[in-house]
Amino acid sequence: MSSTDTVSSDHPIRRLYEQMLIAWNQQDAPAMAACFEVAGNLVGFDGTQADSRADIEDHLLPIFADHPTAAYVAKVREIRMLSSNVGILRAVVGMIPPGLDDINPAGNTIQTLVAVQNAGGWQATLFQSTPAAWHGRPQDSAALTEELRDVMRRGLTCR
Protein backbone atom coordinates (compact mmCIF):
# COMPACT_ATOMS: atom_id res chain seq x y z
CA MET A 1 0.00 0.00 0.00
CA SER A 2 1.57 3.24 -1.01
CA SER A 3 -0.82 6.05 -0.22
CA THR A 4 -2.97 7.15 2.66
CA ASP A 5 -6.15 6.52 0.70
CA THR A 6 -5.28 2.84 0.29
CA VAL A 7 -4.14 2.27 3.89
CA SER A 8 -7.13 0.48 5.30
CA SER A 9 -8.26 1.69 8.71
CA ASP A 10 -8.61 -1.95 9.77
CA HIS A 11 -5.08 -3.01 8.72
CA PRO A 12 -3.57 -4.71 11.79
CA ILE A 13 -0.33 -2.71 11.62
CA ARG A 14 -2.30 0.51 11.42
CA ARG A 15 -4.38 -0.57 14.45
CA LEU A 16 -1.14 -1.29 16.35
CA TYR A 17 0.17 2.16 15.46
CA GLU A 18 -3.08 3.79 16.57
CA GLN A 19 -2.85 1.92 19.90
CA MET A 20 0.62 3.40 20.35
CA LEU A 21 -0.63 6.93 19.59
CA ILE A 22 -3.55 6.55 21.99
CA ALA A 23 -1.22 5.32 24.73
CA TRP A 24 1.11 8.29 24.13
CA ASN A 25 -1.76 10.78 24.09
CA GLN A 26 -3.07 9.31 27.35
CA GLN A 27 0.43 9.30 28.85
CA ASP A 28 0.12 5.58 29.53
CA ALA A 29 3.65 4.13 29.57
CA PRO A 30 2.60 0.52 30.34
CA ALA A 31 0.06 0.54 27.49
CA MET A 32 2.56 1.95 25.02
CA ALA A 33 5.28 -0.49 26.09
CA ALA A 34 2.80 -3.37 25.75
CA CYS A 35 2.61 -2.63 22.01
CA PHE A 36 6.23 -3.79 21.66
CA GLU A 37 7.62 -7.28 21.51
CA VAL A 38 9.78 -8.18 24.51
CA ALA A 39 12.99 -7.30 22.62
CA GLY A 40 11.46 -4.28 20.85
CA ASN A 41 13.36 -1.06 20.29
CA LEU A 42 12.30 2.57 20.51
CA VAL A 43 14.26 5.52 19.13
CA GLY A 44 12.83 8.75 20.49
CA PHE A 45 12.57 12.22 18.96
CA ASP A 46 15.82 13.25 20.65
CA GLY A 47 17.70 10.10 19.62
CA THR A 48 17.26 8.32 22.94
CA GLN A 49 17.12 4.55 22.55
CA ALA A 50 15.31 1.97 24.65
CA ASP A 51 16.14 -1.63 23.88
CA SER A 52 13.41 -3.81 25.39
CA ARG A 53 9.78 -3.58 26.39
CA ALA A 54 10.84 -3.05 30.02
CA ASP A 55 13.34 -0.32 29.00
CA ILE A 56 10.67 1.37 26.89
CA GLU A 57 8.30 1.53 29.85
CA ASP A 58 11.10 2.72 32.14
CA HIS A 59 12.00 5.40 29.59
CA LEU A 60 8.41 6.62 29.17
CA LEU A 61 7.36 6.65 32.84
CA PRO A 62 9.42 9.72 33.87
CA ILE A 63 8.61 11.51 30.60
CA PHE A 64 4.91 11.21 31.34
CA ALA A 65 5.34 11.91 35.06
CA ASP A 66 7.59 14.95 34.70
CA HIS A 67 6.63 16.56 31.40
CA PRO A 68 3.31 17.64 29.93
CA THR A 69 3.72 15.86 26.60
CA ALA A 70 2.22 17.12 23.37
CA ALA A 71 -0.57 15.10 21.77
CA TYR A 72 0.11 13.37 18.46
CA VAL A 73 -1.90 13.98 15.30
CA ALA A 74 -0.80 11.57 12.57
CA LYS A 75 -1.33 10.73 8.94
CA VAL A 76 -0.26 7.28 7.78
CA ARG A 77 1.61 7.54 4.50
CA GLU A 78 2.31 3.90 3.80
CA ILE A 79 2.11 0.37 5.07
CA ARG A 80 4.39 -1.97 3.18
CA MET A 81 4.48 -5.68 3.85
CA LEU A 82 7.98 -7.19 3.70
CA SER A 83 6.63 -10.69 4.26
CA SER A 84 3.41 -12.19 5.57
CA ASN A 85 4.45 -11.43 9.15
CA VAL A 86 6.66 -8.30 8.86
CA GLY A 87 5.60 -4.85 7.76
CA ILE A 88 6.66 -1.21 7.85
CA LEU A 89 4.37 1.73 8.56
CA ARG A 90 5.46 5.26 7.75
CA ALA A 91 3.56 8.28 9.07
CA VAL A 92 3.86 12.03 9.39
CA VAL A 93 3.02 13.45 12.78
CA GLY A 94 2.24 16.82 14.31
CA MET A 95 2.31 17.64 17.99
CA ILE A 96 -0.22 19.80 19.82
CA PRO A 97 1.39 21.22 22.98
CA PRO A 98 -0.63 20.98 26.21
CA GLY A 99 -3.07 23.85 26.63
CA LEU A 100 -2.91 24.84 22.96
CA ASP A 101 -5.20 24.01 20.09
CA ASP A 102 -2.75 24.10 17.19
CA ILE A 103 0.20 22.10 15.97
CA ASN A 104 3.68 23.32 16.83
CA PRO A 105 5.58 23.01 13.51
CA ALA A 106 8.87 22.54 15.40
CA GLY A 107 7.48 19.21 16.63
CA ASN A 108 6.61 17.81 13.21
CA THR A 109 7.92 14.28 12.98
CA ILE A 110 8.36 11.36 10.64
CA GLN A 111 7.58 8.08 12.38
CA THR A 112 8.53 4.60 11.25
CA LEU A 113 7.13 1.43 12.78
CA VAL A 114 8.47 -2.01 11.95
CA ALA A 115 5.92 -4.55 13.10
CA VAL A 116 6.08 -8.32 13.36
CA GLN A 117 3.32 -10.85 13.76
CA ASN A 118 4.11 -13.54 16.32
CA ALA A 119 2.23 -15.57 18.90
CA GLY A 120 1.28 -12.32 20.66
CA GLY A 121 -0.28 -10.87 17.51
CA TRP A 122 1.16 -7.81 15.78
CA GLN A 123 3.81 -6.06 17.87
CA ALA A 124 6.35 -3.31 17.33
CA THR A 125 9.92 -4.48 16.91
CA LEU A 126 11.21 -0.97 16.10
CA PHE A 127 9.56 2.43 16.44
CA GLN A 128 11.44 5.59 15.51
CA SER A 129 10.48 9.27 15.62
CA THR A 130 12.65 11.64 13.59
CA PRO A 131 12.24 15.43 13.52
CA ALA A 132 10.88 16.71 10.22
CA ALA A 133 13.06 19.81 10.26
CA TRP A 134 13.63 20.01 6.51
CA HIS A 135 16.37 22.63 6.84
CA GLY A 136 16.35 25.12 4.00
CA ARG A 137 12.91 23.97 2.80
CA PRO A 138 10.43 26.09 4.78
CA GLN A 139 7.74 25.60 2.14
CA ASP A 140 7.82 21.81 2.66
CA SER A 141 7.64 22.23 6.42
CA ALA A 142 4.69 24.63 6.08
CA ALA A 143 2.92 22.24 3.70
CA LEU A 144 3.31 19.36 6.16
CA THR A 145 1.97 21.49 8.99
CA GLU A 146 -1.10 22.41 6.92
CA GLU A 147 -1.66 18.77 5.97
CA LEU A 148 -1.57 17.77 9.63
CA ARG A 149 -3.82 20.68 10.61
CA ASP A 150 -6.37 19.29 8.17
CA VAL A 151 -6.27 15.95 10.03
CA MET A 152 -6.59 17.83 13.34
CA ARG A 153 -9.52 19.99 12.13
CA ARG A 154 -11.44 16.86 11.23
CA GLY A 155 -11.04 15.70 14.81
CA LEU A 156 -8.86 12.75 13.96
CA THR A 157 -5.90 11.53 15.95
CA CYS A 158 -4.80 9.41 13.03
CA ARG A 159 -5.87 9.34 9.40
Image (cartoon, rainbow, N blue to C red):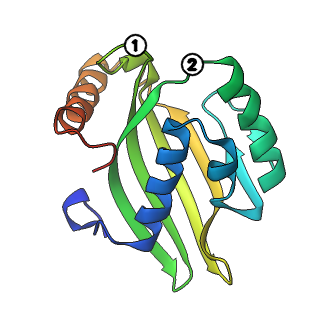
Residue at (54%, 45%) from the top-left corner?
A: 23
Camera-side residue of 100 and 11: 100
* Three-letter code, disc 1: Gly
Report the number of discs: 2
> Is residue 50 in view from this perspective?
no
Cα–Cα span, label 1 and label 2: 9 Å
Residue at (33%, 48%) from the top-left corner?
A: 158
> Is residue 133 in view from this perspective?
yes
The quarter of the picture where residue 52 lies is: bottom right
The spot of residue 131 in percent (x, y) is 51, 29
Residue at (69%, 32%) from the top-left corner?
A: 47
> Badge 2 is on which residue?
68
> Badge 1 is on which residue?
99
Residue at (76%, 40%) from the top-left corner?
A: 49
**Circles 1 and 2 in contact, beta carbons < 8 Å:** yes
Within-10-Å neighbours for mark 2: few <14, some 14–19, many 20+: few
N-terminal-most mark, 1 or 2? 2
The quarter of the picture where residue 118 lies is: bottom right
Determine whether, in the image, residue 159 is placed left or right of residue 61.
Answer: left
* Three-letter code, disc 2: Pro
| SS assignment at label 1 | loop
The spot of residue 72 in percent (x, y) is 42, 35
Q: Quadrant of the N terminus?
A: bottom left
Determine whether, in the image, residue 61 is placed left or right of residue 2.
Answer: right
